[in-house]
Image (cartoon, rainbow, N blue to C red):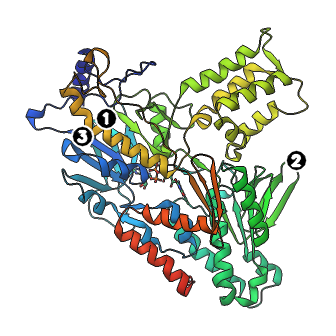
């Protein structure tokens, strides 16, 4: 690794680094290849994760150019948008997964090695990662190993965020991966089987059949809708004696569910849930969860209230995985909430580590600087404070330029920070301290400026990075062009920075109805949108095999209903 660093240094000093020459003169992106083609050695690319970002990178990478090693604790890719459908048996778990080895064997040009293991540590100093295989049964030989890299692609996704709420880890369900969905499916059936046991009081039966969903984002709403469909289409016939005791509640700390969607969708969903008897409780923050009760604080009054539950799904957002947190400490990003990359997906403060998908955010310093400058400019008398009138005008100006700030203000996941911002804007305040507000703005920088944590973003980033890696040698070998690679004077190469293209988002709402927000401010809701949803999700499957399986699961459900066995 020392020799590779020296070579890299040499390449830098000889002006061979790839650079993007837009007006901001950003530094290099995928560093120029330093592979000596004649010695037959290939650069080692290690990819962590086989989710949306990792697999889309692997599918498009020209593996003949590199020695590619992939590490992931799951040897499959899971189509996460259909996880809520797995929780109630609308589709089967195996229908939405594709083995990683099937994906990598499709590489025509080169070979990719896969290791089923967790990456426990990234050693940024020595370009090494440490891994541990984690099998249920005993394995013979060591389960620990390390790998060296020349380029590291971090695509490990994120983990659920419990906000350190007492009892959540122990007593709640999550819906982040396939195991979670399978566990939820079993517990839903358990709740019904428990509720029909003899000698239970009606109150006990009601408690067993109270399903609470914490978080009114797309995942929570979709699970509530799936569960409601399962209930009215299948379970009422199987458990007729308790059908009137079932209750589904969605607890949301913000003012509306689906608050990252268009207002029309959010109110359509609330009305539909109202008609379906799904209770939506807004303005409540959960403060603790025990095995029997969930305790909430009502926002306006601060009053505490506890309700008994049979199952709680916690789906309030995501946070950084420990392996990434540790890496951030090593490279001086310890104070950030999420790993920052530049617009070319290279991790800031590193030369050869790239991060994509949910585990990272593109840090656009410029936006933050603009926001702070708008505040400072508004303080014409240099008093360090703004009147509420001035302050509101500034916030309106910022939101007009950066609409994502408004989304942030409504974002329930950010808890205290949202409160801080809302407090700064509260009616009874006479003036606002600019320094305090600037601090708050900086604290939330990644959230206000980052792209949404979606499969769409992760998939596009993987594709983009593979394209950059595939062109690396071309850039080094032809410093004079082609034009799209060459900077002024033909001396430097450049790639265009990553640009996200939004194709819209869906929210299935149950009862064969869905809502969609499509580019161009186009909103569509109802039964026809559900058919659009079916076609889009069928077409987005990673292989013909999973496409066939998913479509046949949907057909089976239409004809025979869902399977309620607890297996
Ligand atoms: P992931 O897909 O989570 O993949 C992370 C990978 O890293 C996994 O293979 C994991 O096993 C691996 N890994 C974890 N830890 C380690 C480690 N220590 N070492 C090595 N590997 C590791 N997005 C949409 O665009 N549309 C939707 O409809 C949609 N619906 C969703 C529904 C649900 C229920 C959920 C949970 C998510 C949904 N998303 C949706 C979001 C989308 O799934 C994520 O944004 C996307 O999965 C992010 O991709 P990723 O590759 O960054 O992470």
- Which labelled disc corresponds to residue 563? none
Q: Secondary structure at mark 3?
A: strand
- Splitting the image into 4 quarters, where does residue 232 fall? bottom right
* 397 on left or right of 140: right
- Which labelled disc corresponds to residue 44? 3
Q: Which residue is mark 1?
A: 127
- Please give the name of the residue rendered at 66% of the width and 84% of the height, measured from the top-left corner: 235
- Please give the name of the residue rendered at 73% of the width and 25% of the height, measured from the top-left corner: 437
Q: Secondary structure at mark 1?
A: loop
Residue 139 drawn at (x, y percent): 30, 65
Give the Cα distance between marks 3 and 1: 10 Å
* 21 on left or right of 392: left
In contact (CB < 8 Å): disc 3 and disc 1: no
- Which labelled disc corresponds to residue 300? 2
From the image, state whether disc 1 or disc 2 is nearer to you.
Answer: 2
In contact (CB < 8 Å): disc 1 and disc 2: no
Give the Cα distance between marks 1 and 2: 51 Å
Give the answer, above or below, for where 479 lies relative to 168. above
Q: Residues within 10 Å of mark 1 (few under 14, many from 20)?
A: some
Residue 448 drawn at (x, y percent): 62, 35
Q: Residues within 10 Å of mark 2 (few under 14, many from 20)?
A: few
- Please give the name of the residue rendered at 49% of the width and 60% of the height, measured from the top-left corner: 80
């Amino acid at each position: 690794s020392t020799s590779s660093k020296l070579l890299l240094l040499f390449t830098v000093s000889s002006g061979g680094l790839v650079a993007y020459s837009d007006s901001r003169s950003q530094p290099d992106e995928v560093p120029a290849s330093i592979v000596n083609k004649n010695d037959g050695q290939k650069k080692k690319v290690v990819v962590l994760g086989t989710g949306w970002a990792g697999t889309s990178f692997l599918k498009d990478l020209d593996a003949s150019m590199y020695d590619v090693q992939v590490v992931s604790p799951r040897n499959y890719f899971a189509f996460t948008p259909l996880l809520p459908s797995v929780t109630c048996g609308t589709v089967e778990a195996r229908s939405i997964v594709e083995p990683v080895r099937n994906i990598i064997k499709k590489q025509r040009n080169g070979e990719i090695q896969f290791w089923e293991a967790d990456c426990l540590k990234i050693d940024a100093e020595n370009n090494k990662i440490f891994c541990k295989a984690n099998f249920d049964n005993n394995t013979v030989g060591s389960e620990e190993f390390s790998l060296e890299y020349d380029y590291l692609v971090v695509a490990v996704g994120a983990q659920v965020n419990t906000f350190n709420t007492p009892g959540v880890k122990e007593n709640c369900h999550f819906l982040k991966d396939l195991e979670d969905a399978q566990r939820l499916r079993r517990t839903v059936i358990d709740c019904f089987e428990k509720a029909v046991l003899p000698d239970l009081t009606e109150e006990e039966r009601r408690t067993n059949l109270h399903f609470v969903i914490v978080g009114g984002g797309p995942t929570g709403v979709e699970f509530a809708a799936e569960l409601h469909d399962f209930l009215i289409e299948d379970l009422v016939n199987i458990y007729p004696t308790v059908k009137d005791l079932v209750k589904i509640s969605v607890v949301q700390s913000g003012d509306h569910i689906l608050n990252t969607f268009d207002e029309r969708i959010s109110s359509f969903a609330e009305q539909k849930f109202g008609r379906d008897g799904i209770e939506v409780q807004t303005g409540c923050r959960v403060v603790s969860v025990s095995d029997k009760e969930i305790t909430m604080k009502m926002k306006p009054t601060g009053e505490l209230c506890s309700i008994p539950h049979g199952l709680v799904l916690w789906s309030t957002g995501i946070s950084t995985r420990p392996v990434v947190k540790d890496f951030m400490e090593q490279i001086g990003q310890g104070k950030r909430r999420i790993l920052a990359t530049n617009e070319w997906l290279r991790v800031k403060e590193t030369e050869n580590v790239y991060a994509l998908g949910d585990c990272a955010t593109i840090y656009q310093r410029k936006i933050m600087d603009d926001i702070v400058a708008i505040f400072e400019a508004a303080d014409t008398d240099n008093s360090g404070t703004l009147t509420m009138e001035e302050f509101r005008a500034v916030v309106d100006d910022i939101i007009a330029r950066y609409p994502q700030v408004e989304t942030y203000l409504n974002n329930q996941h950010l808890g205290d920070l949202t409160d801080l911002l809302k407090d700064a804007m509260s009616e009874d305040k006479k003036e606002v301290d600019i320094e305090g507000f600037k601090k708050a703005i900086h604290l939330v920088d990644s959230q206000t400026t980052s792209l949404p944590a979606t499969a769409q973003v992760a998939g596009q980033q993987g594709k983009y990075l593979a394209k950059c890696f595939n062109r690396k040698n071309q850039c080094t070998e032809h410093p004079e062009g082609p034009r799209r690679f060459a900077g002024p004077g033909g001396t430097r190469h450049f790639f265009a920075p990553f640009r996200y293209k939004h194709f819209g988002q869906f929210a299935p709402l149950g009862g064969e109805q869905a809502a969609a927000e499509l580019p161009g401010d186009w909103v569509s809701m109802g039964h026809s949108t559900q058919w659009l949803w079916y076609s889009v999700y069928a077409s987005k499957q990673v292989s013909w095999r999973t496409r066939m399986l998913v479509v046949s699961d949907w057909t089976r459900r239409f004809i025979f209903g869902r399977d309620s066995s607890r297996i």
